[in-house]
Amino acid sequence: MAEEKELRYDPAAIEPKWQAKWAANPAMYAAESEKSGKPKYYVLGMLPYPSGQLHIGHVRNYAIDDALARYMWMQGYNVLHPMGWDAFGLPAENAAIKNNTPPRKWTLDNIAAMKRQMQRLGLAYDWGNEVTTCLPDYYRWNQWFFLRMYERGLAYRKQSKVNWCSMCQTVLANEQVIDGYCWRHEDSLVEQRNLEQWFYRITEYADELLDGLDKLAGWPEKVRTMQRNWIGRSEGTEIDFAVEEFAGEKIRVFTTRVDTIFGATSVLLAPEHRLVPVLSAGNVDLELRISALIDEQKVARETGNVGAIDKEGVFTGRYAINPFNGERVPIWMANYVLAEYGTGALMSVPGHDERDYEFAMKYGQEIRRVIRPAAATEEDGELPFTSYDGVLVNSGEFDGLSCGEAQKQMQALAVRKGFGEAKVTFRLRDWGVSRQRYWGTPIPMVNCPTHGLVPVPDDQLPVLLPEQIEITQEGGSPLAKVPEFFNTTCPKCDGPATRETDTMDTFVDSSWYFYRYTDAKNSTAPFDPAKVAYWFPIDQYVGGVEHAILHLIYSRFWTKVMRDMGLVKNDEPVTRLFTQGMVIKDGAKMSKSRGNVVSPDEMVGRFGADASRMYALFAAPPDRDLDWQEDGVAGVSRFLSRVYRLVRRFAPAAVAAKGAEVGVPSGVALKLLRKLHQTVAKITQDFGGRWHFNTSIAAVMELVNEMTAAEAAMASGEVPAAAVAELMRTLVLLIAPFAPFLSAELWVELGETGEVLRTPWPVSDPGLAKEDEIEIPVQINGKLRSVVRVAADADNDVIEAAALADAKVIEWLAGKTPAKVIIVPAKLVNLVVK
């Protein structure tokens, strides 16, 4: 009983001791110089927003990349594993209003709290390269990049629609619009207003962003598909429909299905198309009805429901001419056609488009078939028919052509006769980076009465964000109310000027932060290109699939811009991407708004950091959702207690036998060492493949079960001391990526002086790991009937003979001779009986 008490595992005593030791050694997790001679490995978890505290979802995310970083250190790599803070953003302003706390103080206090939590969890971050995006040493480079993009024509300003609350007298972010109303004023319907906004010309790189996805073999296919759809490349034809009664006026439409143009029975315009005032001039009733369409479209935009809008239309009383057949087609306004997409005009072909069919049915428009199924002999069948596998009918000289051939010939005709052209369009739109907010990077531009927009010179960067400011979110940007910020002088003429009061979208901060990690203290440049050339691309990036589109597309765009500036050599920022599953609690994703957040502080206080981390990796494959169960953490804690007692009990013997040769094992020693080397092989394979850490940890648990069952044999000397030493030493190394505190403690108990983290990962001996005998399932007509044991190197004849001699198999065959024997070597025997 006294020994049991002495060997009791107490993480509350062990873990803080090692945490303090590691914190006192800044080089512990620091990346080495690019001249280290070691292969490099850059592993990164997406940086968090400093909301005030971590939850178990964060623990799971960061336990994944932390385990990988530790494993790669043990494999002899020069590892860069940094952490930072996505520290600008709207929540800080909201908290400032609610708690009367300046956003800077609120943010930095939260960072300090979350950093303490990360350190208590034992996460192996290189804090020497920490990045905080709300500090001037970082955001000055946001401004520097803005100026470089402005010089290259990639940053520009134009009118754009924004959410506007008339009671707040300011612009709202999409997150502040709730069911079409202001988040602060539930009775204030949010308006759509046109304001001057800053944009980055990401569309300049649309083709390259799309084509580059084919090279990202290390990314999940679902992420690449999401990005392809977001970029939305469409090849088609633009066609001019002349407007009847208005000489020289044309409506240009874009279509990917010019082969259906003989089925066009109307032209649909966005309510805000440039021709609408011309076509409705003098018709008060029409103007009112068009205004109603615009209002409906605004509400749909504000509620994020444009795609599901009830389709409404208004006939203008005007007609356009189809250039292919000279037919007059009515011009309608439709609320589901958007002015900013394509040309703001569509040709409606209800016989071959589902959306147009719905609109035509509602308003009694003609529905005409111009494509029949390729395999059909008649023109009947249900409409709309939207397949490309068809043949043209009712299409004049193009009748009988396949859809693909008709598209080629029709496009060529349009080009030849001058009423159309081939066109490639994208769903991707330029990136709006303006935010009418305080807590963000100031845009480094001034407005001069004489010279207009003037960039801030590089030697005047950073344009500092004022620290003492009243945030009311009323009456426009709060920066306009700070005279010492707002009023300035023109860099060109030294005359009075005013600063731009928009701040940058926080996606700007996260689009290049991982480059800054390589050279975070650089005060003369965003980073040293030589350091980036060594570390990039990122070998492994870990983060949520919710960032699959915007963050990752923006970071890919930023990389290509920097490449074209000569700052980096890589085309893509990330070689391999891993998107982890969510943590579920009480049937829903863990979040503060749902009130189902589990604090890691509570789990660490009760069970220890190692148990909390290890359970997060053990409870489910990392790419699947994890249903958080507190009993599971307790179970892992009990397992770690078993490991602690086992190693402590045999540590003296292991220390005494340190360096001794195991020799040729036999009996129990052979069985244990075989299991040990099989476990090493299993975990090594998991780290190099799909990261099934749940099965890796399960394999360690099986190993510990066998070692525990053999304690008497180890204690009596039946298992040689050298074998015991290898078992204990290797077990500690195997748990090191998952339970760093316990492994460090036990490493010392085994008489080792170096850090576990810098100890080479164990190598499996294939000969020792190989079983003498293996079990092979035997099926009869696909159903499992028995299992036979054969030599591990048995050939197919031996395996077949063993299967046919098995008593259970003989009973099931009942005297029948198998018509066929199918053998999957070392895996399966299937006897086919008729």
Image (spheres, grey):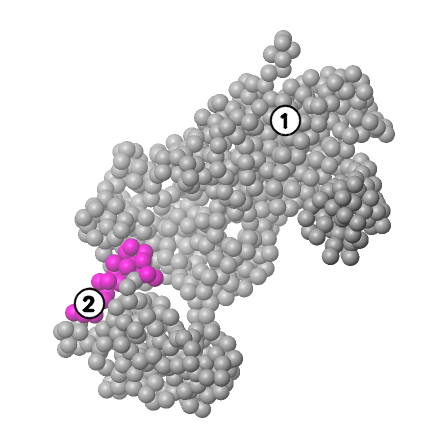
Q: Residues within 10 Å of mark 1 (few under 14, many from 20)?
A: many
Classified by dominant secondary structure, the portion drawn in magenta counts as helix
Q: Residue furthest top?
A: 2
Q: Earlier in the sequence, mark 1 or mark 2?
A: 2
Q: Is residue 611 above or below residue 3?
A: below
Q: Bounds of the magenta span? A: 288-308
According to the image, label 2 marks what residue?
291
Q: Quadrant of residue 37?
A: top right
Tell me residue 302's x, y (percent).
28, 56
Which element is circle 2 on?
helix
According to the image, label 1 marks what residue?
743
Q: Do we see residue 463 in this rendering?
A: no
441 lies left or right of 765: left
Tell me residue 317's x, y (percent).
21, 80
Q: Residues within 10 Å of mark 2 (few under 14, many from 20)?
A: some
Quarter of the image with the N terminus in it: top right
Residue drawn at (82%, 24%), measured in percent from left and top?
660
Badge 1 amino acid: Ser
Tell me residue 775's x, y (percent).
76, 40
Front-most of residues 360 and 591: 360
Badge 2 amino acid: Ser
